[in-house]
Amino acid sequence: MADYDLIIIGTGSGNSLVTEDFADKKVAVIERGIFGGTCLNVGCIPTKMFVYAAEVATTIRDAARFGVDATLDGVRWPDIRDRVFGRIDPISDSGRDYRVSGPHTTAYLGQATFVGEREVEVEITRPGGAHAVGQKHRITGDQVVIATGSRATIPEVIESSGVPYETSDTVMRLPDLPRSMAIIGGGVIGAEFAHVFSALGVQVTQVQRGDRLLHRLDAEVGTLFTQQAQQQWDLRLNTQVVGASRSGTGVRLELSEGSPLEVDVLLIATGRAPNSDGMGLEVAGVQVRPDGRVQVDEHGRTTAGGVWALGDVSAPVQLKHLANHEARVVAHNLVHPDDLRSFAHTNVPAAVFSHPQVAMVGLTEEAAREAGHDITVKLQRYGDTAYGWAMEDTTGVVKLIGDASTGLILGAHFMGPHASTLIQTVIHAMSFGQTAEDVARDQFWIHPALAEVVENALLGL
Ligand SMILES: Cc1cc2nc3c(=O)[nH]c(=O)nc-3n(C[C@H](O)[C@H](O)[C@H](O)COP(=O)(O)OP(=O)(O)OC[C@H]3O[C@@H](n4cnc5c(N)ncnc54)[C@H](O)[C@@H]3O)c2cc1C
Ligand SMILES: NC(=O)c1ccc[n+]([C@@H]2O[C@H](COP(=O)([O-])OP(=O)(O)OC[C@H]3O[C@@H](n4cnc5c(N)ncnc54)[C@H](O)[C@@H]3O)[C@@H](O)[C@H]2O)c1
């Protein structure tokens, strides 16, 4: 008989698997890092709290345009930082304590490694639990869920140089706001932190090896975003870091294009790799895809019987709402082996909380053409609707890609204020198979709300 009915490795979305269904069962929860995982501690939640502070600073700087004179007197970094972590850290601590001393679960605060089929060894690495640091425990489970997430990848040129660097795990806890910062990488994390730190007064230089930022975005909207970024911080496109060395208390970077860069702080944002390595998956019979993701079927089953995976370690995209969705599916499947549910991996939306904000769902124009759709395209400017006009918005756009034969929406790419909220109408339409015409015509749109930009885009498609 196994020691546990269920072993969960990783307490991000994995932590939500302990549902009422396990009320009379034995569950082991294993976590080697900060309890609660990436989103709560070093991802979505703290970044957006910093983004909010950055937006406040940007609004103040921009106020005079509207006849409101205001000056940004200063930015108190320690207060901004402590507001964020003063609220987050207690949530993590209480989540851990609940699993340590709460009902039905045994928490192991350490590194899990498979030593056999559904058999795991945990080396305790953190205090705060029932087990002493340094102890090793071997446990077996009838079922095991791998929910180990992902971690920042570091380019070899930086790693081998030995220079100090930050990642998204550490940069939000800097003791002081630096004077200057280089951000390597032009993806989501780079775009969000470039906004945060430049808005707070740091001289930011972002180095991107491609010719625009946010490569997964529709090319037209991505290019518009890149132009906006160029007006806010120093952006080096088509540029690689080819060397790095220490310079005083900071870092000197040799670039493939242009003169070297000397900065106080270096932030690496070059993508995240699944945490599937170094945990004995081969011993457990769990296969891994060539890109490092654990191989799962549509129900979340790995190649090993009774072993499941979800979230960043196995998902096609690294997003919290997708990890949560997969956790709900797996939570059901764990206790309903004869009635398995499937992951929904279509129409997964995403947003980038930079300045401007960006949101997307479905296909890009390029992908829709490549897939052979007979498409229609509408680019609607925020400024051509009443509220956008009131805001004097000159850059915001809503781009919709439709299927000319069915009237269905294939993709949407928003850039501008509240893009992540406004796009929800389109996500809804795509999820429920509504045509653009029906969504536009069969409901009232509040006038003169900003949502009229979506109505007009739908009508123009
Ligand atoms: C800076 C940043 C901002 C983000 N912002 C957003 C956003 O705005 N919106 C959004 O949708 N997504 C965002 N994401 C992505 C989102 O955070 C992830 O997709 C999500 O948290 C993944 O959840 P998970 O449960 O798969 O993994 P995680 O939350 O990473 O949990 C995995 C846990 O497993 C633990 N672990 C790993 N290996 C082992 C082991 N061998 N033994 C024991 N424990 C182990 C880790 O310590 C970790 O706590 C952001 C990510 C980052 C980095
Ligand atoms: N708002 C959100 O939903 C949100 C926010 C942050 C992170 N995330 C998730 O986290 C994931 C990881 O984010 P990310 O920004 O690290 O990855 P990313 O894949 O979005 O971007 C990585 C960037 O780094 C560049 N790059 C890679 N290697 C490089 C090198 N050696 N030198 C220079 N540039 C290099 C790539 O060209 C790309 O522009 C995202 O894909 C996303 O799923 C989501």
Image (spheres, rainbow, N blue to C red):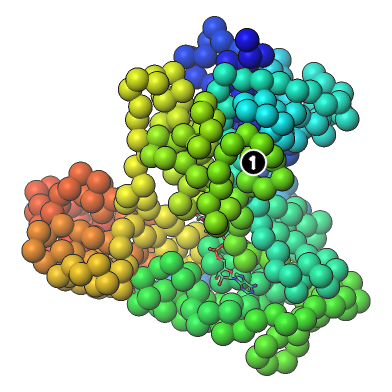
Q: Residue extending furthest right? A: 248
Q: Which residue is mark 1?
A: 282
Extreme residue toward the bottom, this view: 258
Q: Is residue 212 left or right of residue 383?
A: right
In depth, the one of 306 and 445 nearer the eye is 306
Q: Is residue 130 in sight in this rendering?
A: yes
322 above or below 17? below
Q: Amino acid at mark 1?
A: Glu
Residue 198 position, x and y percent, is: 63, 71
Query: Residue 41 falls in which quadrant of the image?
Result: top right
Looking at the image, which residue sits at the far top? 24
- Residue in the picture at 41% in, 24% down: 332
How packed is label 1: few (under 14 Cα within 10 Å), some, or many (20 or more)?
Answer: some
Horizontally, residue 417 falls left or right of residue 380, namely: right
Q: Residue at x 15, y 57 (%)?
A: 408
Query: What residue do we see at 65% from left, 91% from top?
Result: 257
Q: Nearer the viewer, residue 292 or 85?
A: 292
Quadrant occupied by the C terminus: bottom left
Residue 418 appears anywhere in the view: no
Which residue occupies the foreground of this view, 302 or 251? Answer: 302
Q: Which residue is at a point 70% across and 74% down the rendered structure image?
A: 182
Q: From the viewer's side, name the closer residue of 429 and 319.
A: 319
In the rendered image, residue 402, in percent from the top left (x then y), is placed at 18, 64
Position above or below: 402 against 32: below
